[in-house]
Amino acid sequence: MKPKTLTLVCGVLMTFLSAKAQEPMRLMPWPAEVQRGQGYLIIDKTFRVSFEGYRDELLERAATRLVRNLSAKTGLSLLPEPDPAGQTASLRVRCDGADANFLNPQADESYRLEVTPQGAELHAHGPAGVLRGMASFFQLVGLDQVGFRAPAVKIVDRPRFAWRGLMLDVARHFLTLDALKRNLDAMELVKMNVLELHLSDGEGFRVESKVYPKLQQAGSNGDFYTQQQIRELVAYARDRGVRVVPEIEMPGHCKAILVGYPELAAAPGPYVMGPDLNVMNGTLDPTREEAYQFLSRLLEEMCALFPDPYFHTGGDEVNGVQWAQSASIQAFMKARGLKDKHELQAYFTERVRQILARNGKTMVGWDEVLQPNLAKDVVVQAWRSSKMVERSAGMGHTTLVSAGYYLDYNLPAAAHYGIDPFDSRAQGLPRQAVEMVKGTPVASYITDDNMADDSPLMTPEEEKRIAGGIACMWGEFVWNEKEEMMVWPRVGAIAERFWSPAQVKDVALMYRRLEGVDADLQFLGLRHHSNQAMMLQRLAGEHDAGPLATLAEAVEPVKNLARYAPRYRVAMATGQGIDNTVVTTRFVDALPAESLEAVRFHATVRRMLAGGEGSDELRGEVRITLARWRDNDMQLQIVARDSFPLPETIPASQDLKELAEVGLSALALWESKQQANADWLERQRAVLARHRKIAEGCSHLLAAMLAPPPPHELMSAIAPAIEELVNAAATGR
Amino acid sequence: MKPKTLTLVCGVLMTFLSAKAQEPMRLMPWPAEVQRGQGYLIIDKTFRVSFEGYRDELLERAATRLVRNLSAKTGLSLLPEPDPAGQTASLRVRCDGADANFLNPQADESYRLEVTPQGAELHAHGPAGVLRGMASFFQLVGLDQVGFRAPAVKIVDRPRFAWRGLMLDVARHFLTLDALKRNLDAMELVKMNVLELHLSDGEGFRVESKVYPKLQQAGSNGDFYTQQQIRELVAYARDRGVRVVPEIEMPGHCKAILVGYPELAAAPGPYVMGPDLNVMNGTLDPTREEAYQFLSRLLEEMCALFPDPYFHTGGDEVNGVQWAQSASIQAFMKARGLKDKHELQAYFTERVRQILARNGKTMVGWDEVLQPNLAKDVVVQAWRSSKMVERSAGMGHTTLVSAGYYLDYNLPAAAHYGIDPFDSRAQGLPRQAVEMVKGTPVASYITDDNMADDSPLMTPEEEKRIAGGIACMWGEFVWNEKEEMMVWPRVGAIAERFWSPAQVKDVALMYRRLEGVDADLQFLGLRHHSNQAMMLQRLAGEHDAGPLATLAEAVEPVKNLARYAPRYRVAMATGQGIDNTVVTTRFVDALPAESLEAVRFHATVRRMLAGGEGSDELRGEVRITLARWRDNDMQLQIVARDSFPLPETIPASQDLKELAEVGLSALALWESKQQANADWLERQRAVLARHRKIAEGCSHLLAAMLAPPPPHELMSAIAPAIEELVNAAATGR
């Protein structure tokens, strides 16, 4: 028997060889082992799914869903019910039996899928593997010169990590049940298996409590999930092999709780909804038994509502302001020998952990809960830096990695894709950050634990404790119509990082497969594109939104929380709280974090410059695209004239025109094979240098605090590709 | 007191004066009387609705819906619940009271809406008027240089016709409940008030009967509405002031009934689902008492399910084949002195009418029921020609006009808009049609009643019997993902024809307001655009769908049922039935009936040629658009190479390139003010002549039967605008 690692590496290598030799199969996440076969399985209106051996209602619904999704993808009228006859079905599913660990981290998600021109066979030990294999089959079906087909292939697949999650912040801006369901449909497509719901925060409490109804009544704007809706959501997720892990934040980030129950607070209040300093300062009083009686009853109710064996009680960013100001709390600490806020929080954490344990749940907490005596069974979600990943694993905790996977940072898919959960040096703030934020409200939250580090890689023993990762979509700038375009398809790259072997890391191939996810999501009904179209139409008013869509291809929002800079600046000036429930309708709000059109353009430019087959077509494509971008400014300005939110974007549109002209001129020079004139080169490089400078100012909250980015909060997404064109023209290569 | 008609005409005139003097307000249908005031009402996050006087739950839900829709339109977070305080609300609603006629054709839908910079007041006698006024208010809100605003205006409005309907054929292709709800949302926007559901036909029976369950079980592919769903639909429609009028077809178009209950048929069968001659031949046996016993029980059940006082039992296109072949039926006719199939059908119609009457319902029937002794209370839906409108009204029947309003004809909005329900000469087949279809299966359905006519206009007495119109969306080429893009926004023009004064008929203004409807529909969640994007992505496979979207701007599907020609040709050759349940995924399937981009381009060309203010910008816009269309072919061909359904569209793409080049060359010449060279002109006119010839072949089923249109079944939507450009260049004007 070959050792397992070798098989895996071989599988990965074979995979890329075959993918490069032929067309890349649009699988994402890329499977552990893939072997391309000869020919294709045709998908036509006779397509059916059948089961051999074990079947249950969940599997039957999954088969029906697969067929309905294939109907949407192909436009074929397919019979959705599984074929009872069996042998004539195009996809035969063999499941060994039920899995007692289904919807646990121990669930068996492995599967084998073999597609031949005669049919497809999917074999899995348990239902979770069937779901994952069906997602692969759905992705394999594509259209080509001949018809809708799936390539012949043999896949042996299993996840690298057991927890592959998406956290949605429904507290700051509520997301509808329908939106959550669409996210679950999309998660199933890319084999994610944990939906972490950030149900409460300073800005809102979003789940109905029958025991303490003032939680949702006083602690929200009326938008919350009823218990019936939660049950519906959990069932919907279960059908897709997705666990729902709830998070109720404590002892900080809990002002919305204190609005209804101020008697639980560490300071007298009053607590009212809306932006004020209590959003960050409002804290439970961990010294009062009444608080634990309240949490006992509340958590008992919530633990019964959410069947998952894990329960997240937050624990991050307790600033300790109220605790320091309370004489009774200080007295309590002194009496118990608790020397600082961390030890007091550790006391609180252990009390809450015991409540959860009585309800049969394992606690999950943000990495601030990682105090010396933290009970070993607590799962730590490391977010501040990957150093915290290493520390948590080093202290023996099952660890979930979120550092490096924050979707609100507006980073390209490639940035997250390049971070391995095992690499404890991967993610954190630069060392100079502390200096930069001195005197800002941010400062109190930044400690050495946030810093990027050069600590050694983890030991194999520590690596075993990394259970997976959770991509986090925080909601300060994200609301219902915006969420899907922020998360999808970008999170597909993270889903691949959490599922696929670590060696799968070719960025160009990732982006080509991500485009497949992008298309497939439309067939599943995701609204990442249609919501953007609606938002652009809203801005266009009585005009056609086309010029806005064209500009949107070529620009991106500022990065790494730089959009917070104006909010923080106001907060610093006024000493007031920050309103993170604001909804705005600016052009920057109508953009996803990353322009896939710009990524595609960059790839086309590279293929063109590399020469070879089809380069005539590539030159034509680059030229036409640049001309379209150049010509857009005139039409955009006509639209902007009649729309109050748009004038701020005109400089970005003019910049696009200028960059497109630089690109066209470089392209013409490169095609002519003439020597670049020094004057010309200097002019172009001056334009590009200006864009690099803008990009630097847009690169990070801290940079943006020091030197504000342009008011439109946009940066060019195509400048790097234009720079390559200019360099090629300059060097004649 | 001024006579009513004069007020009305004055209102209309004032309206257009003010609309032309300032920006056109985006109201559709245009109100009976409009007077633009000074200034605007700002819509910001303080916007609330309040009620004075009468309010009920339906009105409160309507207010909440209006605010939610305004939230979607503006992106503002608005409080959806009506403001109990009242005086501070931006829109104050005063409803005099409940209306005993609500959801009857006698309902009072009139309203007054006054918007000033200080606030808006809506006054109506009853709930229906409130709904109609809210739709106007929603349309008035737009974005401009200052903010989201509604112009100050005084509107006094009432409908011209009481029935303003949309018929959806859910028999041939099923439409989901969600799709019907989206249609109802859209109907509310344009003040339509009747959803006619064509629930049964040869191809399917789509409503659950508990009394005769084989109707939906044997008579459908499993897609039907449960009774619970119907109740949900009816309640949803009621909330929007829309009546649901069900249609169950008989005695023809009823094969789906006969599959489960063959004993009711006029010929022994067997009857099986699927395309065969029985789709048209299958008929109830009107001589058997068992048939009436069956209908009594079925209609009793259905009449209880649908609360509307009207019930449609079809009655069209009974070809009489089975009746002629049955000895017992012939004997019955002889015994009763019924001299032909028409008199036998009249006997049947009267029996069914009595069943409906026992259930408290008024019968509606297609115009074939219009036999000499038809009971006077039967409402006739005239579809074959507008001559039938006149005949029905002349015979004293309340008449609904569908002739001229068939949405499956793929006609531009302007075509339907130009037809007045009172003009009995407006719509029908050309006289030579009978000759053209001789020997085709179509022939037996075409009689003198289908012919366009030069009969005199109706008398005022007859006009009073025209209760309104129903736009019909037949389902042979329309399925769930296709329906919204076929109906919306196009039917908005018909809604205006049925609501607005007859004098409102400026086509250019109609199209500008139709674009407002198009945008508003996106905010309501309609899928006419997002479904097209999905269909184009399906065709693009692994490519970006952009080049397909660009081609889609400039072409349209063939007109007037010409897409049936290939199906009929096969049917004639084989003697088999036609399969009208087919679903195809060709490029032509992904197109709406009319390209609004082409309409807009044509308008821009005209404004440019007319000269005057802004003509530099207009020239730029025309040039950039033409260049984009010219450049698209290369990129489309790259996509088409990898997609099996696309190669057929390449000639259409090449034609677009050629036409765009003609346009660019004409534009350059016109701009240069040079004399057109005779050679040049001849070459351009040859291209245009070829396109006119293609367009003729695409113009009608009958033309297409004689000379098949191109296999792609597309015609240029921009050729007429290009022709104007060439003419302008030729004449130097």
Image (spheres, coloured by chain):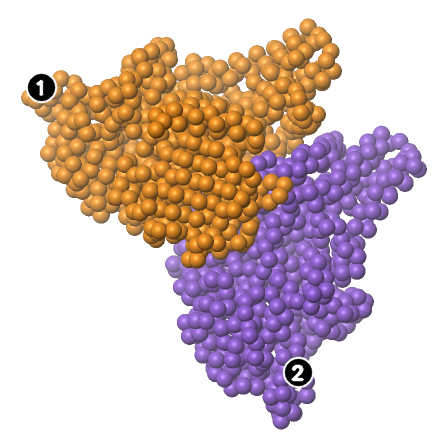
Chain colours: A orange, B purple
Q: Which residue is mark 2?
A: B324
Q: Residue at x 38, y 22 (%)?
A: A420
Q: For the N terminus of chain B, which image quadrant?
A: bottom right
Q: Position of residue B700 (x, y in %)?
A: 74, 59
Q: Residue at x 61, y 68 (%)?
A: B276
Q: Position of residue B732 (x, y in %)?
A: 87, 37
Q: Which residue is mark 1?
A: A337
Q: Residue furthest right?
A: B678
Say whether residue A237 is left or right of residue B593. left
Q: Position of residue B556 (x, y in %)?
A: 69, 49
Q: Quadrant of residue A316?
A: top left
Q: Is residue A676 visible?
A: yes
Q: Is residue A654 above or below residue B394?
A: above
Q: Position of residue A168 (x, y in %)?
A: 36, 35
Q: What amino acid type is highlighted by mark number 2?
A: Ala
Q: Residues within 10 Å of mark 1 (few under 14, many from 20)?
A: few
Count of residue discs: 2
